């Protein structure tokens, strides 16, 4: 068996797994050693020491699964098990995952590789693994009851097939899927091209991450698995801002980002300061004639989108889902809108009974980010994050693309905040404000009304109380 040093170079915090009690030591001796990850950090790319060479990916707040070569077959070992995942500093969730984390490790192979994956079930119920988007024999597709028997607790099953086409794929259970995916069971799969592909460019940095979501009450740690749409924690690789690592690149780098969506809704992923091309889906590379420049791409449920761009603008560029509720944490959906409501008299009465009562929401929700009020245990603020100029007031699916001219090739470390050149930061204007110039034809109606308008009553706007489709 290969040593752990050969399995992984520089990742750290890897410990050998203990086999399930129902699996004998003799049986486990024939398997590749399952390797566990104890940290939620972004690990360095795993440069292949055996098999065909390729440029590895970097999994945001994740890692690549080590393997061994056995008579020309690339062997992996996944362990499905309960895990404790840190969503952000101060917040942990009791999830189900693979090899110590949720999501599980990214699997990287090369087009044409014969792959053998051992899956050991340490969950309290049966499971399976579906290899989302792969071309493979029907009996290896991983649908419990349809293409295979379920993997019972304590049992180990083997999946074996050839990675037939290059691309970006996902893996997840197809057994009690509602429960197991809601608990965090999923992972990424990247098949690199065997030879130079005319539709797949060489890049300097190659990132990947999954979109997932949980509904965890403030103060709790276990997701509510029956939730369909009203999730309150929107994650990238089971992390929420400010716990999502930054994407750190060198100015002039060609950058690829692969995003897979295993939530229950779509996500318009938006990048500031650059334009990108959508160069691939889980169906394969996009023909060059079908590409166009974008700054936002929508990733629907069960889809993967691969984007590429030239990082030619220095700075700290926001990178996030453009659904505003998806960049907030632990958000209550039934809070009424209080903007414009005068609380002064009622506050006087309430504070007689509740001296520490505070008014919130009459000026907007930014106060939530400024108040350092006590929170339930194991709960991150709804709007948070401190930047170089103050509160960022974000959460959920938000990170930063950091572009630096002095970032060394292959260096993924955080360079710190960007130092703006003089005169390139917005500033407060303290002089006199001139009257705006207006056109003589500005305003008015396109044609006169036939009848005079009645006395206008003030319009009352009420935010809908329902919460559907987000």
Image (cartoon, rainbow, N blue to C red):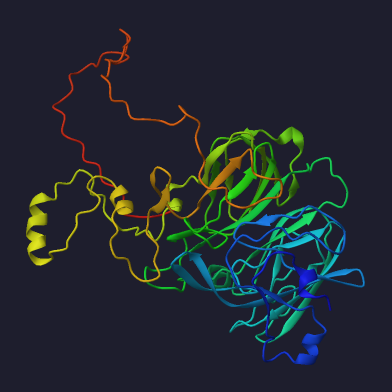
In the current view of this chain or complex, which residue is farthest to the top?
Answer: 440
Q: How many numbered marks are there?
A: 0
On the rendered structure, is 54 left or right of 121? right
Q: Quadrant of the N terminus?
A: bottom right
Q: Position of residue 60 (x, y in %)?
A: 61, 57
Q: Position of residue 234 (x, y in %)?
A: 48, 58
Question: Can residue 226 be seen here?
Answer: no
Residue 197, quarter of picture: top right
Compared with 20, 267 (above or below) is: above
Q: Position of residue 8 (x, y in %)?
A: 74, 67
Residue 384, quarter of picture: bottom left
Residue 325 versus residue 312: which sits nearer the camera? 312
Question: Can residue 196 be seen here?
Answer: yes
Q: Position of residue 220 (x, y in %)?
A: 40, 73
In the current view of this chain or complex, which residue is farthest to the right?
Answer: 71
Residue 125 versus residue 415: which sits nearer the camera? 415
Compared with 38, 405 (above or below) is: above
Q: Residue at x 17, y 35 (%)?
A: 458
Residue 315, quarter of picture: top right
On the rendered structure, is 193 left or right of 215? right
Residue 467 versus residue 339: which sits nearer the camera? 339
Q: Residue at x 80, y 54 (%)?
A: 192
Q: Residue at x 72, y 80 (%)?
A: 149
């Amino acid at each position: 068996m290969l040593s752990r040093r050969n399995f992984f170079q520089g990742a750290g915090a890897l410990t050998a797994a203990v086999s399930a009690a129902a699996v004998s030591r003799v049986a486990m001796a024939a398997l590749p050693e399952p390797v566990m990850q104890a940290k939620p950090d972004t690990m360095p790319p795993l440069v292949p020491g055996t098999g065909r060479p390729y440029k590895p990916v970097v999994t945001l707040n994740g890692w690549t699964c080590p393997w061994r070569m056995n008579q020309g077959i690339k062997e992996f070992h996944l362990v499905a098990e309960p895990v404790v995942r840190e969503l952000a500093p101060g917040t942990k969730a009791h999830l189900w995952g693979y090899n110590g984390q949720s999501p599980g490790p990214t699997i990287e192979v090369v087009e044409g590789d014969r792959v053998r994956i051992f899956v050991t079930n340490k969950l309290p119920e049966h499971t399976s693994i579906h290899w989302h988007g792969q071309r493979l024999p029907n009996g290896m597709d991983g649908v419990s009851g349809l293409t295979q028997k379920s993997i019972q607790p304590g049992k180990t099953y083997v999946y074996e097939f050839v990675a037939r086409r290059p691309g970006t794929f996902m893996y997840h259970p197809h057994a009690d899927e509602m429960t197991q995916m809601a608990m965090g069971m999923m992972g990424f799969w990247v098949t690199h091209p065997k030879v130079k592909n005319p539709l797949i460019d060489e890049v300097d940095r190659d990132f990947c991450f999954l979109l997932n979501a949980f509904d965890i009450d403030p103060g709790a740690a276990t997701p509510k698995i029956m939730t369909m749409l009203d999730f309150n924690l929107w994650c990238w690789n089971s992390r929420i801002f400010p716990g999502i690592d930054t994407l750190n690149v060198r100015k002039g780098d060609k950058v690829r980002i692969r995003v897979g969506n295993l939530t229950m809704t779509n996500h318009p992923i938006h990048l500031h300061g650059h334009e990108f091309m959508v160069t691939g889906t889980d169906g394969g590379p996009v023909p060059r004639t079908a590409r166009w420049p974008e700054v936002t791409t929508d990733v629907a449920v069960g889809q993967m989108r691969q984007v590429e761009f030239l990082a030619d603008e220095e700075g700290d560029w926001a990178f996030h889902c453009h659904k505003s509720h998806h960049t907030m944490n632990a958000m209550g959906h039934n809070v009424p809108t209080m903007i414009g409501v005068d609380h002064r008299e009622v506050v006087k009465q309430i504070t007689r009974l509740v001296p520490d009562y505070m008014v919130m929401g009459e000026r907007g929700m930014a106060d939530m980010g400024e108040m350092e009020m006590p929170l339930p245990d194991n709960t991150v603020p709804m709007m948070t994050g401190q930047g170089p100029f103050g509160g960022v007031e974000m959460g959920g699916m938000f990170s930063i693309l950091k572009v630096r001219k002095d970032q060394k090739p292959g260096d993924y470390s955080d360079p710190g905040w960007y130092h703006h050149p003089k005169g390139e930061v917005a500033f407060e204007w303290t002089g006199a404000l001139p009257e705006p110039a207006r056109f003589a034809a500005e305003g008015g109606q396109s044609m006169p009304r036939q009848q005079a308008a009645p006395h206008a009553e003030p319009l009352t706007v009420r935010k809908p109380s329902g919460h559907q489709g987000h």
